[in-house]
Amino acid sequence: MNEVSIKSPYKIIHFGDSHIQGDRISGALRNNLQALGGNGGSGLFFPYSLCKSVGPAGTNSRITGTYTYASILKNPTNQQIGALGYQISFSQGALFTMEFNEQFRGLRSKEFTVLIHGSVDTVAIALTTPGVLKSQEPMGNGLTQYRFECAEIPSKIEFKALTACSLWGLEFIHEAGLVYQQCGVVGAQFTHLLPYKEEILSMLAWQKPNLVVFSYGTNESYGSIDSVKYQQRISAFIQSIKTALPQAALLITNAPDTRSAGKPPKSEILVNRCLDRIAKETNLAYYDVNRAMGGWGSQALWQANDLFLKDQLHFNKKGATLIGSLISHALFVACSIGIEEQDLLMQEINASFPKKNSAPIRLEPKPVDRIYIVKAGDSLSAIAKNLGTSVESLCKLNGISDPDSLKLGQKIRY
C-alpha cells in the first residue's frame, strides 16, 4: 500500500480530563503528528492558572481588576462556556496579561486571535501590547473573534476590557501545518460536556477540525454509574457532532489502568465497556489504552518502572510520552502514514515500555455498589443485554425467581 501523507492545513481537537489538560499525552501526539504534517501550532489555549488550575506551560498570566471564572465542572452563575471548558469574566477596565517564555509548547506568531463572549455590537477589548486590530468577526452565539497583528512576535499579550465580557481562548495564527489543540479539563467526565453542547458544536463548526479525539473514563470510574443512561447520553452527543461535522473523523480512547488512593477505581471496567460500546454503536474509531498498557494490573508494573507519579493516577512525563507514542503509532498504522516514523516510534516504545521482571497481576477491580434502577418498560433481558451480562446471572445475584416480575424502582445489582 502506498503511504498516505497528512495534507496541510490539518486540525485535530482533543477533549479529555487532567491527562489531557496537562498536555503531556496530547503534547506527545502533537509532536509526532506535526513531524509529518508540519507545525501549525497548538490551536486555542487558555490561562488555566487564573482559574486555580494548571497551565499552560511556559506562560505567566495575571489580571489587574475584578474578574470571575467558571468551568464545565463548576459554574455557579450558569455562564456560557466554549469547547476549551473554561471561561473568565472580566469587569469593565480589567487588564489581562499573558507572558510567554521558552517553555511555551505552542508556536508563537505575529498574528493571534482572542475569542471574547459578550455584546457583539461594540468593541469589547483594546490591545495594549504594541499591535493593530486587523478584524473583529462575530462568530454567532455572542462570540466574537478579534484578530491582532504585531510588528514582531510578541513575548506577551495584553489587552484591556472596554466593557464586561468573557475570555474563551487565544490562538496564534499560522497559515500552514498541522494544528493539535487540547481541550482538557481537570476532573472532567464525558458527561460534563453535555450541558454545553450548543456552544461546543458552534465552536467546532467554526473550527472545522479534521479529527476529534475524546479521552475520558478515569473520573467516571471513581463512583457508581448508570451504564445504560451513560451510554445513551454519550451516544446521542456523538451523533450530534457527527451531524455537525460530517467531514471529521472521530476517535475515542478509554481509561488507562490507574489507582485511586492505592485502589482500582471500582467502575473502571464498566466505564471502559461502555466506551467500547459507544464507539461501536456510533461507528467511531476506538483505541484501548488499558489494553495497550498490558491490561488490568499493569499499573503496578508501570509504577515500578517510574512511569507514574506517586499518586498512581497520573502519568509522569515519561509515562505520558509513552502513551502518546502508543496512540501515535496506532494512528500511523491505521492510516498508512509515516512508515519511517512507525519504525522510530516502535523503537522508542520498545525501549521505554515497562520491563516485565515479573508478569503483571491481571486483577480486575471488584464491581462495588453497581446498581441499576428499573424504569418503566424495562425487561430483565433488555437490562442484561445493556449491562453486558445474562438474565441468569442477574437472577442469581439478586435472588430473582421470576424474571418477569420486575417492579418500577427496583434496584438490580450487577
Image: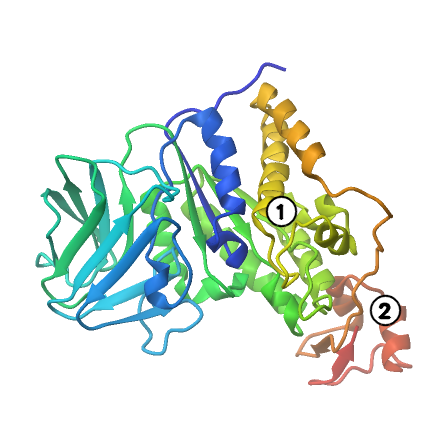
Q: Is residue 285 visible to us here?
A: no
The residue that label 2 is drawn on is 391
The image shows residue 327 at horizontal and vertical percentages of: 61, 39
Q: Quadrant of residue 124?
A: bottom left
Left-right relation of 178 to 95: right
Amino acid type, residue under disc 2 in the picture: Val
- Do residues under tags 2 and 1 come within 8 Å of each other at their CB atoms? no
The residue that label 1 is drawn on is 319
Asked whether 402 or 280 is in front, the reply is 280
Disc sitting over residue 380 in the figure = none
Q: Is residue 36 visible to us here?
A: yes
**Circle 1 — which element?**
helix
Amino acid type, residue under disc 1 in the picture: Gly
The image shows residue 32 at horizontal and vertical percentages of: 52, 32
**Image: 77 above or below 255:** below
Asked whether 208 or 356 is in front, the reply is 356
Q: Residue placed at 54% from the left, 64% from the top?
A: 189
For the N terminus, which image quadrant? top right
